[in-house]
Image (spheres, rainbow, N blue to C red):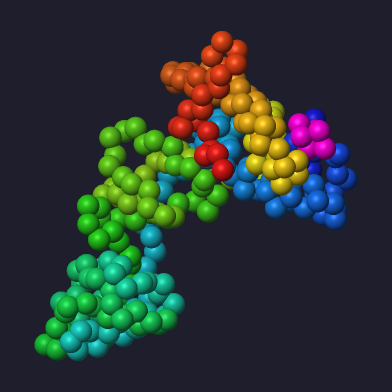
Amino acid sequence: MAQNQLAIANAALRKLGAEEVSSLSDSTKSAQVMNTRVEPAKQAVLRVHPWNFATRRIKLITRVAGTTVTAITAASPPEVTSTAHGLLDGDQVVLEDIGGMTEVEGVSYRVSASAANTFELEGVDGTAYTTYTTGGTARRRPAFDFGNYFALPTDCLRVLPITDGTKYRVEGRFIATNESSLELKYVQDIDLDDNNADPLFAECLSSYLAWDCCYAILQSNSAKDRLWAEYGQILSSARFTNATEGGHQQVVLPQTYINGRQFFSDSNAYPLRG
């Protein structure tokens, strides 16, 4: 069965009791609402659970790359020229492989007066430094606690726990750590139109999408509450199935219906309700 964007959007519309659409580019209200929400909803449901089908492994061995340094002034403070460096005031930067000006080699500095192609080394008096000659890089690094940044894969939506004792922290699109390499497991963003989604994920997504778009299409809060409960039930089943395919993983399920009627959402299990 197809599990592409259109199929999932139509599954959500059926849950709403609304008419299906032939294309997400249709001019109908339902198509327009679904078209704007299917991608954010997909990413929310992917982030909320470590789906086996979307889990990837990678070994990160390259720290955040530095930008090329072409000049450093012997001034107070020194001004570093590095085209399109991307650094902001307050960032921490380490200068490496610098020719001539040995005083700055391997030292970490706080960036100030950042412009498109230059920045200054805050609080530094470099008037007596050796003249810069050639080469070097300026590499962003954590200001404290950690020594390196690794860039997250571009398709990473959620980093899964690193359980070998490695100290780390996800900060924006980077992982801060003291390690020189990292073995990383993460939940990958997927293209729904590749039709590779797990069927239970597709069911979860269509239920979440129906809940997300409910008020815009039906203007009904009671229907929205019903759809939220349905989403929770399907996610519980999906989490159980997913866990049993993981060998030693512990199966932890959220509470769903008590006495068949009352639904409790686990704040660690579901995307936050709007």
In the image, residue 23 sits, relative to residue 271, either above or below, namely: below
**In the image: residue 123, left or right of residue 139:** left
In the image, residue 262 sits, relative to residue 77, either above or below, namely: above
Q: Foreground: 227 or 23?
A: 227
Seen as rendered, the residue at the extreme top is 259
In the image, residue 53 sits, relative to residue 63, either above or below, namely: above
What is the x, y in percent for residue 175?
A: 37, 50
Residue 23 within the segment the image draws in magenta: no
One can see residue 146 in this view: yes
Q: How many marks?
A: 0
Seen as rendered, the residue at the extreme left is 128
What is the x, y in percent for residue 122?
A: 22, 77
Quarter of the image for the N terminus: give it.
top right
Q: Foreground: 103 or 150?
A: 150
Find the magenta span and give its range.
13-18
- Residue at 27% in and 84% down: 79
One can see residue 7 in this view: no
In the image, residue 213 sits, relative to residue 260, either above or below, namely: below
Q: Quadrant of residue 195?
A: top right
**In the image: residue 264, left or right of residue 205:** left
Residue 14 within the segment the image draws in magenta: yes
What is the x, y in percent for residue 11?
A: 77, 34
- Residue at 34% in and 79% down: 114
What is the x, y in percent for residue 37?
A: 68, 48
Quarter of the image for the C terminus: give it.
top right
Q: Foreground: 226 or 231?
A: 226
- Residue at 19% in and 75% down: 104
- Residue at 85% in and 51% down: 28
* SS majority, magenta: helix
**In the image: residue 145, left or right of residue 244:** left
